[in-house]
Amino acid sequence: MKQHQYRVHPDQIPEHLRGNRSLFSRWFGRTVLGLFGWRVEGVIPDVKRVLIIAAPHTSNWDFVFAMAAVLGLNLRIRWLGKHTIFKPGVVWFMEWLGGIPIDRADPKGIIEKVVALSKKEGGVAIGLAPEGTRKKVVKWKTGFLRLAHDLDCEILLFGFDFAGKRLVIGDLFQPTGDNEADLAFIRAYYKQYIGRHPSKA
């Protein structure tokens, strides 16, 4: 595959992480990206389990483009979102997209739920925004590092680059166990990407 020929292509993900989405949903995802001039760069590595974090998260548009990429790639992913966005009437749609509502008041329950899901489904990709909010945060929470430890998997760094209209499948990161050092490294890594609202990054 010559990557530059496509906005998004299923060959960018390993076979065991491909979903069974309809041809229409795949077309729809590619069309949304195309209409806005966005593309997906990079390839998801062939690993059994991976935790995907996406940043900088500064706008609701992040979700739109991320879900368009998920559909266009036909990626089988479960993503974690605040339970408050799973509103009546759209819960079915959010779950169809792979959403898992989380209540931050019960962080242990979140981890137990995702670990159980990983064991049940075998190969799995879990996605989340490490900042946990679109607002500017001074300090990221360490929950995603604990989750990677409990899933025994590496972290795939996925970037939103609004300046270049790119969703970039970046590097794999292996947590060291030193949360402060790991957070510092990851935050520095994401400085190369420009979100929709840079002042919130």
Image (spheres, helix red, strand yellow):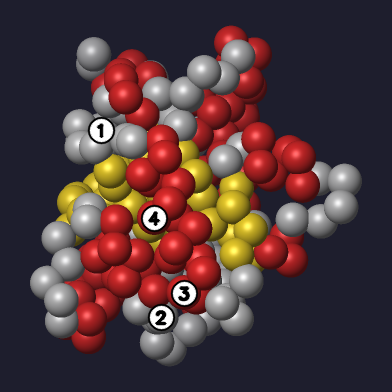
Neighbour tally class for label 3: few under 14, some 14-19, many 20 plus, Cα within 10 Å: few
In what element is the residue under mark 3?
Answer: helix
- Which-is-in-front pick, marks 3 and 1? 3
Residue 56, relative to residue 188: is it above or below?
A: above
Q: Is residue 24 visible?
A: yes
Give how far apart the Cα atoms at labels 2 and 3 are. Answer: 14 Å
| Residue with the mark numbered 3 | 108
Mark 1 near mark 4, Cβ–Cβ under 8 Å? Answer: no
Residue drawn at x 27%, y 51% is 156
Left or right of 96 on screen, residue 148: left
| Mark 4: secondary structure | helix
Residue lying at 56% horizontally and 77% vertically, measured from the top left: 106
Query: Counting residues from the N terminus, which is met first, the one under dot 3 or under dot 4?
Result: 3
Q: Could you tell me the amino acid type at mark 2? A: Lys
The residue carrying mark 4 is 115
In the picture shown, does residue 123 fall above or below 195?
A: above
Label 2 vs 3, first from the N-terminus: 3
Q: Earlier in the sequence, mark 2 or mark 4?
A: 4
Kind of residue indicated by mark 4: Val
Circles 2 and 3, Cβ within 8 Å, touching? The answer is no
Three-letter residue code for mark 1: Val
- Residue 141 has which mark? 2
Task: Give the alpha-carbon distance from disc 3 to disc 1, as whole Å.
Answer: 31 Å
| Badge 3 or badge 1: first in the primary sequence | 1
Q: Which residue is mark 1?
A: 43
